[in-house]
Image: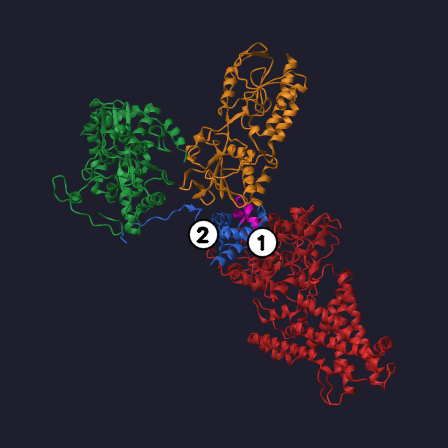
């Protein structure tokens, strides 16, 4: 969205193809954003207003084929329509890791194991947060790095934003249930950006949230449908067993099949981590090896919202510069 | 518990099980632990299902116990297994069925190794040739005996005289299923239902009318863990593991435990006795233990075989309460009578556990 | 009780559900700085006593959080209260009162 | 015939009760003394010490010399009450003898003399006569006291004039006693005046005139008013005497005993004893300790100052947290007019809270130091300021000293921090270890860089060797010309570490050293009044934020005259200051080392 409006501002004619019925991507499902816990819709509204009617937005569109011409591209759409363009920007984002693939956590099998996305949806809808049996959770656990930094899940990379999301959601749970015990089970806490570490400090100091270092190895369901989890308490180097009423899995980023399909059509290089490779990691991070094709945001790997917006701006400028050369 | 979730997983972990012409290899220890089980397996396949099962008198241990106790090197184990395959090849069979879970695990391990490192396979062929002058083909299909029973569970049910239902209350029996660690923990794809929620025994229980208990320590090892058991001083570890499981399953009030491994039923059965003697605890209802069955013994009961022919009298946790629930008739008099009627002698009654 | 020549081994596992959190709760009230520990271990690295014995003042905080009272009791006895750790701690945890308050709390319980 | 009237009863009962309480407690405390101290006491009574004791009682309890030194107005206020009242009683008794018929008078007789006696023979201005003189004197003394009373009232609102920012929050008993005390003298004035006015004679220059005025105003009824006032006067006295033992005024009798305890050489104890109890009772809650406490002035903690702490101990309501919330910097002790060992009483209470937990120091190794003439003990904290160690090594090498670095491989704590927590037994184990270590080194001089260690070495180790702080030792070296120095022209401010200054009374050495190598600038509140850096190991229950407030406040004062370097002589002070200081913070040793020519 940002890239589109920037380009429009620069006087370019932009067509924004969206697969969903609305633009905004994952941001639409997010209640509040880290680190300041401001409502997600604020940002979304800003972006939408900024976009206004500057660009031609076409929702529910799927690109079936792309013909790469000398200096332009022909897009064949599922709708039957086709359209020509001088430059392509892939901003098709990411998918969330399918938590069912971590079978040992029992997601979609045990009643009270949910994902961070589901919890966020609960926050957003304002629906009461209870166990599936309808009782107020007395102890809530957050499992970090679900589907990230995990050879068994086939993802060696770090999804970057789950740590801070975990801390944010933990605080939000405490805001709702001050009496509840909240645990974060982590391998490392990567508070990589500004105000993140302070938020982590607040979580400990103000909200009394416990962070326990170790990766949850397996979960099981008790008779009362609470979850008993096993973990090594690496700080005492002893195995630890704990019952939680609600277990939240902080699911990471995975490349979306759609992105990979488009990449294949444009034969763009794909990295070991199955995210798209820019022309140069440092100096040409929004360009690709293919002239006229550009990348922005989470097609290149895990991105925070602020970083994605910044990246989109850069991409817009790169595209503008490129179009001048035509 | 969201059952759909499990079903979806079970769909993912389907495995091919040959339907006839089996080359059967036995377990080292089961005939001492639960003497009738392997015999019953053969009887069911041959007499009930009319399958072709071949046993070769020359087959040996797979050396798994030695391998897992760190006394047999992997090369040796592979060569021994190569010999088993050569016996199969000679006898003109391609479907390999093992009675032992550890063997099954080891066979899978060896075959995977050979698949990924063909040079190792060549080496082993060389060893075998050198040592015995034998050659061999790889089996087309390797299954554990419980896989085979699983495959024919409906046939068994249809021929059966009993179902896993309490004939007094009409309620389904509540069953704890325990899978031997070496069945699918090493190679989830080689086990029916995978490693986390194996289906092989669940399938039998459900299709025979029972209800499966999923308790927190379900995944935990029975406590055999070769090294732990074989060294006497280490048996404290072994029994502690079993105890952990008993304590975890007790609140669910299971009617019996079903297993598919040589070691597990042995330890569930004997350790319940040992614990009752050491700590005075029992885990079943009103002072009884929780009966432990092998899948063959259970199949036998379903098919209405005489409990004593199934060797249930050698269980240390008495099975009578279970037989009563199943409504299976038995003669207490003949419990300790041998095949030809001679007296096998009665064991001392346990101090705390109810004995019949 | 029969003797079989072996005993049932004790669990090494920390059973968090069963452990005693009363000392922890007392500390949360009387020395809240304990909440902010990030287990970096700088306290242990500089500890005077730690140079001589396997005393781990970082572990004191961890055992406290896990409700492992027995080992905790043993551990706190080794502290010399010299206060080097306080000068090092990046999160301003007040270790010396932590030690004393733990002892007070344990006394209260017994 | 003995003069009597019902209204004397409240006074009399009050007096009897008070005397009973004093005798009861004094005997209790004296009995509770350990044998050797009781012997000292007995010896003392018949020695010259007794009279010097009396002198001190006069100077401190009545004249309030120390108060005067602190603030003239404050001193006068206290004196007018104490001395004035004392003299009033004295003179009153003598005066009463003039009119007394019997040999012994009931104690109330002099107090209510004017009620019983209306001497028309002498007029108020005939002060050359004996009775006239006494009338004059009595009125004069009464006005003297009332002047103090007025000051006391002013102090309520304008405490700054008396050199105090904050004053004590008083308890109920204190307030009751205070009201009575304030009533006694004006009521006495009125009672006497009304009486004298009614009888038209018997008063002094003040009472008589005031009386005549009342007589005109109230005529006949002034007699009844007078009677009522005498009742009120007696009641005020009575109630004051009864509440006294439960109020701050208990310090009046107790301080007297304390003074004799000290005079007779009875030493303070490390555990609760009658000495500490007498000290606690001797606190007059004057509140001068409140302003000097940095926890109050800098960290806004206002409930733990010595006056409140001692009160809560006396009322047996002391809490663990309050006991442990004190820098033990010694500033309050330094300024206490009664000279109570406040820090010691803190440690006694901490000891009482220290609970049942034995320490486990079985891990301490066998000390095996190298033999050397000088033993250097850096101390735990110094290991966190390696620059000090480097400086010391450098200087000792330059001076060619044969020394052994006792704790080069890390130290066993000196034991003072443990003592500060009240655990002396446990501290004893650490002390035994280090003592052994020092003795085995065979050194005749022990040098340490840490004032905390220095103090405990001196006070607890009883070592047969010279114990020096490095500032003292370095001064020796330089005076003996072993270390050549050149002045580095830098303006430095010196901070006195608590345990070196107030704790060990060493203010000279560091200053002399610095004078040789740099230019010392003025520092407010130095030497005895020096501030604590905030890093004190004496305090347990405080947040790091509060500590920082104390440190920043101290820094502001220390750097007020714009030095280039802040110099101290304690690794803990250095470490504490350098976190927040805008300027360089160095140890004296570093300054000296830096002044050694290439």
The reply, left or right, for residue D469 in relation to residue B280 is right
Question: For the residue labelled by badge 2, is the local secondary structure a helix, a strand or a loop?
Answer: helix
How crowded pointer 2 is (Cα within 10 Å; few <14, some 14-19, many 20+) is rated as few
The reply, left or right, for residue A143 in relation to residue B334 is right
Magenta-colored span: C30-46
Return the residue nearer the eye: B60 or A191: A191
Q: Chain of mark 1?
A: D
Q: Is residue B105 above or below residue D360?
A: above
The reply, left or right, for residue B123 in relation to residue D303 is left
**Image quadrant of residue D322?**
bottom right
- Can the viewer see residue C79 in this picture? yes
Q: Is residue D228 above or below residue A35?
A: below
Return the residue nearer the eye: B135 or B89: B89
Separation (CA) of disc 1 from disc 2: 33 Å
Please check the rendered image and state whether residue D193 is part of the magenta-colored stretch, yes or no. no
Q: Colour of chain C?
A: blue
Please check the rendered image and state whether residue C31 is part of the magenta-colored stretch, yes or no. yes
Nearer the observer: mark 1 or 2; the answer is 2
How crowded pointer 1 is (Cα within 10 Å; few <14, some 14-19, many 20+) is rated as many
Are dots 1 and 2 on a single chain?
A: no
Badge number at residue C71: 2
Badge number at residue D378: 1
Counting from the top left corner in percent of width and height, residue D305 is at 65, 60
Counting from the top left corner in percent of width and height, residue A164 is at 55, 36
Chain in green in the render: B
Counting from the top left corner in percent of width and height, residue A41 is at 61, 30
Chain in red in the render: D
Q: Is residue D371 above or below residue D127?
A: above
The image quadrant where one finds the N terminus of chain D is bottom right
Q: Colour of chain A?
A: orange
Spot the residue most to the top.
A70
Return the residue nearer the eye: A44 or C88: A44
């Amino acid at each position: 969205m940002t890239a589109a409006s920037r380009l429009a501002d620069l006087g370019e004619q932009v067509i924004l193809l969206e697969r969903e019925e609305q633009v905004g991507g994952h941001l639409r499902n997010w209640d509040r954003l880290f680190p300041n816990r401001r409502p997600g819709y604020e940002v979304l509204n800003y972006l939408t207003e900024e976009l206004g009617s500057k660009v031609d937005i076409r929702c529910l569109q799927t690109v079936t084929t792309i013909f790469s011409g000398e200096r332009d591209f022909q897009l064949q759409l599922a709708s039957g329509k086709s359209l020509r363009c001088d430059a392509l920007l892939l901003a098709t984002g990411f998918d969330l890791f399918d938590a069912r693939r971590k079978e040992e956590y029992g997601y979609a099998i045990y009643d009270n194991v949910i994902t961070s996305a589901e919890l966020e949806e609960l926050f957003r809808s304002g629906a009461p947060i209870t166990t599936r049996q309808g009782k107020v959770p007395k102890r809530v656990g957050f499992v970090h790095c679900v589907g990230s930094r995990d050879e068994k899940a086939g993802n060696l990379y770090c999804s970057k934003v789950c740590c801070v999301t975990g801390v944010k959601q933990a605080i939000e749970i405490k805001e709702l249930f001050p009496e509840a015990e909240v645990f974060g089970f982590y391998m490392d806490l990567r508070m990589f950006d500004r105000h993140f570490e302070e938020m982590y400090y607040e979580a400990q100091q103000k909200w009394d949230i416990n962070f326990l270092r170790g990766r949850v190895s397996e979960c099981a369901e008790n008779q009362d449908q609470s979850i008993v989890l096993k973990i090594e308490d690496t700080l005492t180097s002893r195995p630890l067993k704990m019952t939680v009423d609600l277990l939240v899995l902080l699911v990471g980023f995975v490349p979306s099949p759609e992105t990979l399909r488009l990449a294949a059509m444009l034969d763009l290089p794909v990295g070991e981590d199955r995210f798209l490779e820019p022309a140069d990691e440092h100096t040409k991070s929004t360009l690709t090896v293919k002239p006229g094709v550009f990348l922005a945001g989470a097609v290149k790997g895990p991105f925070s919202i602020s970083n994605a917006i910044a990246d989109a701006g850069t991409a817009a400028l790169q595209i503008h510069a490129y179009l001048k050369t035509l | 518990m969201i059952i759909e979730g499990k079903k979806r997983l079970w769909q993912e972990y389907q495995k091919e099980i040959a339907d006839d012409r089996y080359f059967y290899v036995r377990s080292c220890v089961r005939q001492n632990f639960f003497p009738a089980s392997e015999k019953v397996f053969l009887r069911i396949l041959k007499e009930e299902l009319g399958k072709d099962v071949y046993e070769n008198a020359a087959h040996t241990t797979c050396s798994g116990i030695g391998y897992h106790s760190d006394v047999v090197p992997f090369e040796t184990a592979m060569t021994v297994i190569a010999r088993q395959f050569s016996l199969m090849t000679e006898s003109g069979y391609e479907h390999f069925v093992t009675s032992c879970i550890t063997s099954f695990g080891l066979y899978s391990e060896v075959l995977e190794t050979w698949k990924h490192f063909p040079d190792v396979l060549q080496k082993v062929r060389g060893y075998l040739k050198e040592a015995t002058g034998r050659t061999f083909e790889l089996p087309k299909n390797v299954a554990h005996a419980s896989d085979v029973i699983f495959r024919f569970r409906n046939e068994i049910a249809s021929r059966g005289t009993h179902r896993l239902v309490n004939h007094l209350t009409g309620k389904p029996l509540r069953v704890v299923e325990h899978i031997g660690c070496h069945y699918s923990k090493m190679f989830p794809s080689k086990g029916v239902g995978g490693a986390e929620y194996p289906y092989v025994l669940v399938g039998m229980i459900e299709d025979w009318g029972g209800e499966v208990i999923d308790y927190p320590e379900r995944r935990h090892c029975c406590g055999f863990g070769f090294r732990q058991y074989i060294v006497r001083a280490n048996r404290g570890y072994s029994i502690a593991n079993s105890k952990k499981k008993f304590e975890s399953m007790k609140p669910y009030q299971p009617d019996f435990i079903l297993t598919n491994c040589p070691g597990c039923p042995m330890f569930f059965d004997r350790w319940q006795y040992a614990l009752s003697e050491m700590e005075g605890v029992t885990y079943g209802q009103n002072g009884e233990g929780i009966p432990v069955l092998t899948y063959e013994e259970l199949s036998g009961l379903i098919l209405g075989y005489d409990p004593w022919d199934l060797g249930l009298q050698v269980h240390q946790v008495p099975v009578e309460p279970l037989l009563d629930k199943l409504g299976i008739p038995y003669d207490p008099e003949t419990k300790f009578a041998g095949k030809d009627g001679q007296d096998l002698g009665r064991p001392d009654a346990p101090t705390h556990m109810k004995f019949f | 009780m029969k003797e079989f020549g072996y005993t049932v081994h004790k669990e090494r596992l920390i059973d968090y559900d069963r452990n005693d959190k009363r000392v922890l709760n007392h500390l949360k009230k009387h020395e809240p700085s304990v909440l902010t520990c990030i287990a970096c271990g700088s306290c242990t690295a500089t500890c005077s006593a730690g140079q001589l014995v396997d005393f781990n003042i970082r572990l004191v905080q961890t055992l406290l959080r896990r409700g492992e009272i027995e080992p905790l009791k043993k551990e706190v006895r080794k502290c010399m209260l010299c206060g080097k750790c306080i000068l090092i701690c990046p999160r301003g945890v007040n270790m010396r009162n932590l030690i004393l308050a733990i002892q007070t709390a344990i006394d209260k319980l017994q | 015939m003995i003069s009597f009237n019902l209204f004397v009863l409240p006074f009399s009962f009050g007096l009897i009760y008070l005397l009973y309480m004093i005798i009861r407690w004094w005997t209790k405390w004296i009995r509770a003394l350990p044998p050797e101290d009781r012997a000292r006491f007995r010896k003392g009574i018949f020695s010259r010490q007794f009279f010097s004791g009396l002198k001190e009682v006069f100077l401190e309890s009545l004249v309030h010399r120390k108060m005067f030194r602190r603030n003239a107005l404050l001193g006068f206020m206290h004196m007018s009450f104490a001395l004035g009242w004392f003299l009033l009683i004295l003179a009153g008794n003598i005066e009463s003898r003039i009119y007394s018929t019997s040999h012994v008078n009931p104690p109330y007789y002099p107090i209510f003399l004017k009620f019983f006696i209306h001497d028309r023979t002498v007029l108020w201005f005939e002060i050359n006569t004996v009775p006239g003189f006494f009338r004059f004197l009595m009125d004069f003394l009464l006005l003297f006291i009332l002047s103090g009373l007025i000051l006391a009232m002013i102090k309520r609102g304008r405490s700054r004039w008396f050199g105090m920012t904050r004053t004590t929050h008083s308890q109920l008993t204190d307030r009751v006693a205070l009201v009575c005390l304030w009533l006694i003298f004006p009521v006495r004035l009125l009672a006497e005046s009304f009486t004298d006015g009614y009888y038209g004679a018997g008063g002094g220059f003040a009472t008589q005139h005031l009386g005549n005025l009342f007589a005109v105003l109230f005529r006949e009824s002034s007699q009844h008013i007078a009677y009522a006032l005498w009742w009120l006067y007696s009641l005020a006295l009575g109630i004051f005497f009864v509440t006294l033992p439960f109020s701050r005024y208990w310090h009046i009798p107790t301080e007297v005993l304390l003074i004799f305890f000290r005079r007779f050489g009875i030493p303070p104890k490390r555990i609760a004893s009658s000495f500490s109890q007498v000290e606690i009772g001797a606190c007059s809650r004057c509140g001068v300790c409140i302003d000097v406490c940095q926890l109050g002035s800098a960290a806004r903690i206002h409930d733990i100052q010595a006056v409140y702490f001692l009160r809560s101990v006396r009322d047996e309501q002391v809490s663990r947290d309050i006991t442990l919330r004190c820098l033990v910097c010694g500033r309050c002790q330094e300024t206490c007019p009664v000279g109570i060992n406040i820090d010691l009483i803190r440690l006694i209470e901490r000891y009482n809270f220290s609970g049942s937990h034995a320490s486990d120091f079985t891990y301490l190794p066998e000390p095996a130091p190298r033999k050397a003439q000088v033993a250097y003990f850096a101390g735990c904290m110094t290991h966190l300021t390696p620059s000090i160690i480097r400086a010391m090594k450098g200087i000792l090498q330059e001076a060619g000293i044969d020394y052994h670095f006792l704790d080069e491989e890390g130290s066993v704590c000196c034991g003072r921090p443990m003592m500060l927590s009240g655990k002396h037994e446990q501290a004893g184990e650490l002390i035994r270890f280090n003592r052994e270590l020092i003795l085995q080194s065979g050194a005749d001089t022990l040098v340490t860089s840490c004032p905390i260690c220095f103090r405990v070495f001196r006070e607890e180790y009883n070592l047969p060797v010279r114990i020096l702080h490095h500032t003292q030792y370095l001064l020796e070296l330089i005076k003996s010309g072993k270390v050549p120095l050149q002045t580095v022209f830098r303006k430095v401010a010196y901070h006195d570490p608590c345990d070196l200054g107030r704790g060990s009374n060493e203010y000279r050495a560091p200053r002399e050293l610095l004078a040789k190598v740099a230019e010392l600038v003025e520092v407010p509140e130095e030497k005895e009044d020096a501030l604590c850096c905030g890093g004190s190991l004496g305090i347990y229950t405080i947040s790091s934020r509060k500590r920082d407030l104390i440190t920043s406040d101290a820094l502001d004062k220390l750097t007020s005259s714009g030095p280039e370097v802040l110099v101290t002589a304690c690794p803990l002070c250095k470490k504490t200051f350098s976190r927040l200081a805008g300027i360089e913070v160095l140890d004296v040793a570093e300054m000296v080392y830096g002044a050694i020519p290439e």
